[in-house]
Every structure is written in structure tokens, then in C-alpha cells.
Amino acid sequence: MKISFLGACREVGKSAFSVKTDNLRLLLDCGIKIHEDYETPVLKNLSFDACILSHAHLDHSGSIPALFKHNNPAVFSTFPTIPLVSLLLEDSVKISTYNKVPLPYTRSELNKALRKMVALAYEQEYQFFDGTKFSFLDAGHIPGSAGIALESKGKKLFYTGDFRLTKTGISTPGKLPKEADALIIESTYAFREHPDRAKLEKDLVKKTKEIIDSGGTALFPCFAIGRTQEMMELFTKNKIADVFVDGMGQRVSDIVSEFPSYVSDPESFQDALSFARPVKDRDMRKRIAKSNSIIITTAGMMDGGPVLSYLQQLKSENAKVFLTGYQVEGTNGDKLVNHQPVNFGRYSEKVTLPFEHFDFSAHAGRKELLKAIKQINPSKVFLVHGDSCEEFAADLKTQGFDAYAPALGESFDI
């Protein structure tokens, strides 16, 4: 078994890892990195029999249509991931058209990719023609996220995808295999821990109640998948104000509701769907913008979506912005945190609204990363999807692990 690292090497973004046996070539994830343009994995002149997708986020799925320029592979994922990927890729086409920045694939290639998607349940084994087999394990990251357990000729490989081993408001704890010869593991937070979730939720509710009790508006820029649903549930359980949901998070919530077994508490999620009110049009957006309420809206890093409209309307009002996710450098969320002008499209303007950041990460912290590595105890550990992969590899070597931070294009035999 030969593993080649085609993306997410010593960085976050464009995850893609080739696994080749004697007669079979697989691709684990095929993501994209979005800057001012689009960065894709190293795919030129490569062909694949199948792509196995860990989850819907674009840094893992965004380049899948590009595979269909010269290939026609099957694309395997869990059941919720198919409609979520479809939604995100279709939205990417709209954004690309609006911004006049071409995507690395055509509409025809996107359609081909969506037609070739095949859904499998967690722990359902699939076997290829050469005897290589794989299955998905719940990764605990977002609904439908999965680790990929692969076996060929007695050698076992496990790819974590993005994962978390503790329960969040929307996802069940991730699962790990008992063993593997090789482990490809995300290392987003290799040297950082996350706060206790229960205490974090309690603090967020308290701070939100303060702005609501003062007659103000609580604005939550949230990722459409996972974080929007988690905030909906939290503020349905703690009914301190009316809750409105705007942007793509509405459609994601509708999709997730069709797969109740993929959320940690289906009943609570259904309650949240009933309690939170969707924002239906611009007039409604204007009406609620200055209301004494909680507004959950995309985009999570504030680079687009309805959140920009709310920021414009609330800039001189009694309101507060609650950031619940990581803000990539250069995004509007990062600019807000660093008191720099926010890009509204046609102009940039400094936003003076008070804000607070809460670390509701859906990624494993350092303790969980070490727990996964020690539990699986692989012969080789490959660290990807992080800005400190090389440092983490050196750290693991001092603990007795044969650890690597692969460079882009580097290959290893297992």
C-alpha cells in the first residue's frame, strides 16, 4: 500500500491523500483552499477508481468535481454528506459566478460528480474488486462526518478526517478503530486544548442573556453545518429570547432533520427546528435586525451571507456579535477581532460593535489527538491538516512514535 500526500500538507485546506495498491487507486478526500482564488490538490495526470469522502466541508470536498475532467470515479460518503456536499458545491458555483473567479471545474463536471456519489452507513463494509475494503466510523465533527478505516492485503490504514471524541451539542462522540498500521490524523490543534463544553455553554448563555436583558440584539455569525444547529439547540433549551435563523444554515438544518440518527439528540434538534424561526426575505431581515432577539446567520467567518446586512444595520444599535468558530487570518471575522475595516463588498468600514469569541471547536484538541494516537498505536503516524505538523511530529518522536509531517507530493510505503 502506497500513500501519497496531495494536499493539507503542513497547512489547513485542500485535503487529499492517494492510496494505491497493486491494482487499485483510491483518493481520500478532495478538498479546496479558498483565498482570493481557488487552490486545489495536486491532481494533474492522476486517475482514481474511487474517492472516499470524510465529510462535506469544502476543504475536504470542494475539488471533487475536478476529478471528472479525465476520470469517472465512484464517490463514497455517508448518507447526510451527499445532500450537504451538493448544497455546498452548488453554492460555490453561485459565489464563483458572482465574484467572477472561475472554479477549477465546470457545471457539467459538478453534475457528473453528484451523479456518482454512493452512500454507506457507519460501519458498513465495502469491498473493491481487488479485495481492498473500507468502512466509515463516526468522526464526531459534524453530522455525517466519518473517519475512514481501510484494509488491503493485511495492512490497515485509518484516516481520521476532522474529528472530535467528546460530545458536542449536535454530534455524538467520534469513534476510533482498535488498531492500524498507519494513521493519517488531523492536527489542527496539536498544541492547544479547548475549554470544557458545559462551562462554555453556560458562559455563552449568560453573556447572551445580558445583551437581551438590556433590550439589545445578539448576532451569531455561524458555520452553516454543525454550529448553526448547535446554537439553535442551545438557545431552544435556554429560551431567553426569540431565535431567528438566516442564510444557508436554514437549508442545512432541513437536510440534517432528514437524518435524525446522525445527531446526538434527535428530539432536542426537532424542538430547535420548531422553536427557531427562519428568516424568509429581506423585509423580515430588516424587521428583526433591531429586535430584542438572537439572530443566527451565515457566514461563520463573515465573508459573505446575510451577516453583512445585519452588521450594516446594527452598527449604531444596542447589539453584540458572538463569534463561536475559528476566524481564518484575513477574513472579515479576523478583521473584526483585530479592529480592522470589514469588507462589505463595494466598500470597507470599521465595525465598532462589541464582540466576544467563544471556542466551540468541532476539532480534537491536543489531549484527544494524543489519545487517538496512543489508542490506535500505529507503526507510522502522518500529521496533516495543521499549521504545526512538523513541530507535532518532532514532539511525537520524543514519545516513541514514528511520526511524519509529509511535504506536498511526498509518498510512503506501508
Image (cartoon, rainbow, N blue to C red):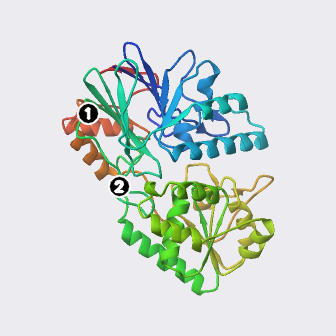
Q: Which residue is mark 2?
A: 173
Residue 23, percent from left and from top: 40, 13
Question: Residue at 37% of width from left, 39% of height from top?
Answer: 124
Q: Nearer the viewer, residue 217 or 258?
A: 258
User: Can see residue 408?
Assistant: yes
Q: Nearer the viewer, residue 28 or 195?
A: 28
Element at label 2: loop
Location of residue 367 with respect to 216 vertically, above or below: above
Kind of residue sitting beneath label 2:
Pro
User: Can see residue 357?
Assistant: no
Residue 197 image-quadrant placement: bottom left
Q: Earlier in the sequence, mark 2 or mark 1?
A: 2
Q: Nearer the viewer, residue 387 or 4?
A: 4
Q: Residues within 10 Å of mark 2 (few under 14, many from 20)?
A: some
Kind of residue sitting beneath label 1:
Ala
Residue 91, percent from left and from top: 68, 45
